[in-house]
Image: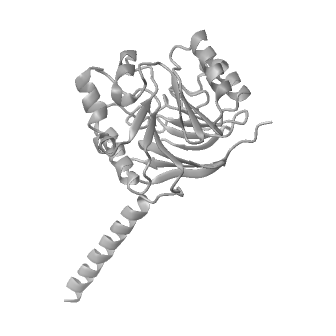
Amino acid sequence: MFSRTLTRLLTTLLLVVSVWCSVSAQQLALPSAPNSVKFAAIGDNGTGDPPQYDVANQMTRFHAKFPFDQVIMLGDNIYGGQGPQDLVKKFAQPYKALLDMGVKFYASLGNHDDPVNRQYPLWNMGGERYYSYSIKNVRFFALDSNQVDQKELAWLENTLKSSQEEWKICYFHHPLYSDGGTHGSSVDVRVLFEPLFVTYGVNVVFSGHDHIYERLTPQKGIYYFVEGAGGELRKGDTRRSAMTAMAFDQDNSFMLVEIEGAQLAFQAVSRTGATVDSGTIQRQVRR
């Protein structure tokens, strides 16, 4: 009798602990203010494999608490075959719940992407390799880091110069700074983009390519994030250095970002719903 009672108590305790862990694993670390700019970020996601679907499911769960209306895509949106059925299996199907809720995805091209798919309506690229759009006080610049030419640089300079929004956010595939062991910093792209970012007051930059999550220490006053683990993962690939503020390479992940006034809040979430990094950034004062 005592043994059965003890067993029932232990079972109940384990159930309570399990439920508590499940709830605490999906805690939102962002303010979720009513009029803020809310978005998610994913990179290197288009595999069509279970980890991509797991990340997409977590994004949907968090959307219930943090109703982001857009997702920035950091390249390698589709791996392998790039045809219509691949776009369904590796994009439209995994993110169907979010798409059905009206969430818009804004893609940038990675080295595994077929540039033809910049015409794909659900990526909102307007048929362009690089483009810009604004939401409230934030201006986004989706760039093509695969083949940077003078035409793109001239467009970027003119668009940055004419931007009147308080926040300037750039995103593209190859990271200017990264501690990923497989690729690391794309110095060839850095020498082209960074001078313009510094001159015209870019605040935050998101990239993929290395299949990890990383937050870098500010470089020349700019905040950099690597989020290349939306579908692919290179476990244990981080080579930490003096510029590593935080890194996570043990599971797939995505980011949630919120901007309100002069503050940006971020949260990196794993495939299981655990928060692996979070914090706030104050908008830099440009002189």
Image location of residue 121, percent across then percent down: 34, 26
**Outermost residue, bottom side:** 1
Q: How is the image coloured?
A: one colour
Quadrant containing the N terminus in the rendered view: bottom left
Residue displayed at 47% across by 58% down = 28
Query: Which residue is at the front of the view, 51 or 284?
Result: 284
Note whether 85 is above or below 214 in the view shown: above
Residue displayed at 63% across by 37% down = 165
Quadrant containing the C terminus in the rendered view: top right
Query: Which residue is at the front of the view, 134 or 42?
Result: 134
178 vs 269, left or right, is: right
Residue displayed at 38% across by 42% down = 103
Residue 136, quarter of picture: top right
Image location of residue 59, percent across then percent down: 38, 47
**Outermost residue, right side:** 287
Res. 190 visible in picture: no
202 vs 89, left or right, is: right
Res. 1 visible in picture: yes
Image location of residue 277, percent across then percent down: 54, 50
Residue displayed at 64% across by 20% down = 158
Query: Which residue is at the front of the view, 207 or 185?
Result: 207
Query: Which residue is at the front of the view, 280 or 130?
Result: 130
Q: Please give the count of numbered marks on the rendered protein.
A: 0
**Outermost residue, top side:** 150
47 vs 156, left or right, is: left
Note whether 282 is above or below 83 in the view shown: below
Note whether 226 is above or below 33 in the view shown: above
Image location of residue 20, percent across then percent down: 38, 68
